[in-house]
Amino acid sequence: MAQSIEFEKEFVQTSERVKSVDLHPTKPWILTALYSGNVCVWNYQLQKMEKSFKVTESPVRSAKFIVRENWIVVGADDGLIRIYNFDTMEIVKEIEAHTDFIRSLAIHPTLPYVLSSSDDKLIKLWDWEKAWICSRVFEGHEHYVMQVAFNPKDLNTFASASLDGTLKIWNLDSGSANFTLDAHSKGVNCIEHFMAADKPLLISGSDDYTAKVWDYETKRCVQTLEGHTNNVTAITVHPELPIIITCSEDRTVRVWDTTSYRLENTLEYGLERVWSVAYMKNSSKVVFGCDKGTIMVKISSSQGSDSTNV
């Protein structure tokens, strides 16, 4: 890597275990979903809580902003999806979505769709312009479906990661997978699409302690990222900087170069296991959710005497 990457803490908030984090694209807000069943919104500029409310007595594992509707959507272990109006915190809709824990929610970038994945081994597509009907069910995984992620380069497709050790690629208009990758020797917790050198790639993180990079077209593993000493729980590829970020139950965040796949940094923030990560486009901010709270860092890159925030 020609440039050095630096991480500066901007916001730290201790709390109960944080299972999910999201960043609002225009307001200084971090959305956190807690194992305790609470959802909180923190203002990182003012360093204070904006909102907090109890969703359920069971853990909340995913919460996302739906910015264009001014909503928060929440998935919990009771199998319900709940949608809240952000301003009033009133519940807009409550859906009996799954028969087991909801692990992941994904918001379509342009269409009125939410994907949910669950321990019932199913993925479901919800259309909020049609009164939140379930417009498709995707079947094929043989174990819990831990995460779903839309493909930003082809918004009609998405990927899923499962504890059955596979990744699957799906079309929104078919309930059967396009293809399956036998990805890891143990369960897969997380998945993300990214581009490198104009090549479409996938990256997955697993209970086998590794992350793997996949060529989307040839369906081959092009690199295994080794170094974590416990399960890899969350993964992201920064949209502006050439870095892959992996999070783990080993209490560390590891930063890898997207070209050489070399390990560049190992970060440990003292908040125990790291469960989730989120970034904001056109921003230097990345936020992590951990056993003991939430931390947001600002990433800066420097090359020689030049230093820039992205």
Image: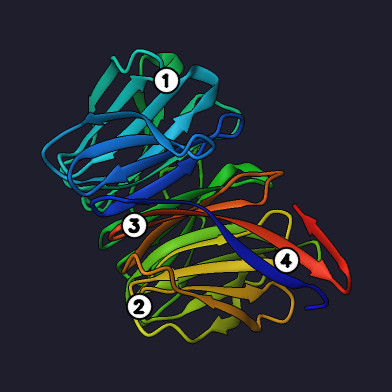
Q: Is residue 123 visible?
A: no
Label 1 is placed on what type of residue? Trp
The answer to whether marks 2 and 3 mark residues whose Cβ atoms lie closer than 8 Å is no
* Disc 2 secondary structure class: loop
Instruction: Name the quadrant containing residue 239.
Output: bottom right
Give the x, y percent position of residue 276.
41, 57
Q: Earlier in the sequence, mark 3 or mark 4?
A: 3
**Residue shown at 22% from the left, 53% from the top:** 119
Local secondary structure at mark 3: strand
Is any atom of residue 291 visible in this view? yes
Q: Is residue 55 above or below residue 122?
A: above
- Who comes first in sequence, dot 2 or dot 3? 3
Q: Nearer the viewer, residue 300 or 33?
A: 300
Q: Which tag is nearer the camera, tag 3 or tag 4?
A: 4
Give the left or right position of residue 121, taking residue 281 as reference: left
Report x, y in % for residue 210. Answer: 45, 80
Kindly identify which residue carries mark 1: 128
- Give the structural element (helix, strand or loop) at label 4: loop
Q: Which residue is mark 3?
A: 146
